[in-house]
Amino acid sequence: MVVTGVKLKNYRSYRNQAFELEPGVNIIVGPNASGKTNLLEAVYVAGVGKSFRAGDKDLISYNKPWARIDLMLDKGQRTVKMWRESTKSKEFEVGQNIKKRLKSEDKLPTVLFTPDDLRSLSGSPKSRRKLIDGLVAAMFSDGQTAINRFNRALLQRNHLLKQANPNKDELFVWAVRLGEMGGQLAGYRQQVIGKLNKQSGKIYSELAGKKHRVKFRYISALDSKNYRHNLDKHLQDKTDIYLGFTSKGPHRDDISVEIDSRDSQASASRGELRTLVLAAKIVETSIVEQRTNQRPLMLLDDVFSELDGARRQSLSKKLGGYQVIITTTDADAMVEHFGAQAHILPINS
């Protein structure tokens, strides 16, 4: 499925504007704060169902009561409507159907690259979990549901644990629920790690221009070989009652990566860490393509500015054959890598 155009009304910095898109590489060019990411974000919202950086109300132009995105496809059209003050805040028109939210089968196969992604492995454990959970959502049809259910169960249990005298029966119920959801999520993450270890080394080597070995590891205070049992055992003891929060589980786990048997956190350069993340995102691309039997739409928000020339060139080759939308302040650099056939969309501040 190919996106052929997008129309925006009262969406962030856009009052009433339309853009045509080509099946190949589309380059959104403009100075900083000109609205490049807003346009990219609008395509993502219409395709996936939510923003990657803000809540729904923030997507509506200042002092406007509503916003609208029309996304034109080679096989139909979809519309997103949002209201600032209404009994309904957002709805989607997909074909002839009105939906409050997009189900998995309604979403367009999409892979998003952002500068935050490129910094995720050098950030906090939370940022590394987010990177892996993005692949969980891509790899499993119920992956995002599993993540959401675990987070809701964790919130409920922690709420109880903060009480002076938590109800033991309620704690037991949420411990069982959290153990079930946590075991499923950790199992999904470990399968993603296995996928990364099969594919990322080859991709990393191609991006870096030199042969390397890459090893992802799942780090947990719980024994990963029997994760669910050990999580259940922990949740049934009294440790967390004394602490007032859930001290072990998927929300506390971490991911480490080795390059040629060296811990990347301790020794990798910024370029090496970014290349690792790019390799993981390209693995995500193959996962989405395999699961949906469609080539995903590639959205790249100012990613090339953080890469050196060699890695830009290698990434450009990896994106061949996909519909790509890129934001940049430097059109000449993008044309250098993608060629004169790239479609330029100038944005003025």
Image (cartoon, grey):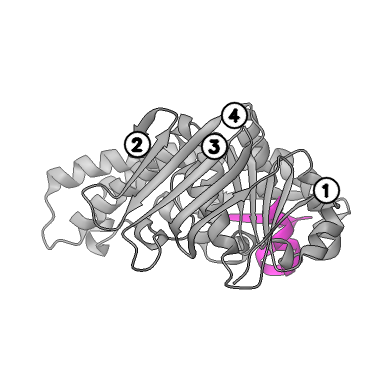
In the image as oriented, which residue stretches furthest toward the front?
Answer: 16
Sequence-wise, the earlier of marks 2 and 3 is 3
Amino acid carrying label 3: it is Leu
Q: Which label sits on residue 180?
A: 2
Number of the front mark, 1 or 2: 1
- Taking the spot 78% from the left edge, 45% from the top edge, the residue there is 318
Residue beneath label 1, please? 341
Residue underneath mark 4:
291
Q: In the image, residue 147 lies at what x, y percent?
A: 41, 44
Q: CA distance from mark 2 to mark 4?
A: 25 Å
* Amino acid type for the residue under numbered disc 4: Arg
What is the number of the mark on residue 108? 3
Which residues are drawn in magenta? 254-278
Residue at left offset 24%, top offset 51%: 157
Residue 232 x, y percent position in the rendering = 33, 41
Q: Tag 4 or tag 2, which sits nearer the N-term?
A: 2
Crowding at label 3, few (<14), some or many (≥20) Cα neighbours within 10 Å? many
Identity, as a three-letter code, of the amino acid under mark 2: Glu
Disc 2 to disc 3, how far (Cα)? 30 Å
Compared across the picture, whether 24 is left or right of 168 comes to right
Along the polypeptide, which appears first: circle 3 or circle 1? Answer: 3
Give whichever of 48, 340 is nearer the camera: 340
Q: Nearer the viewer, mark 2 or mark 4?
A: 4
- Residue sitting at the far right: 210
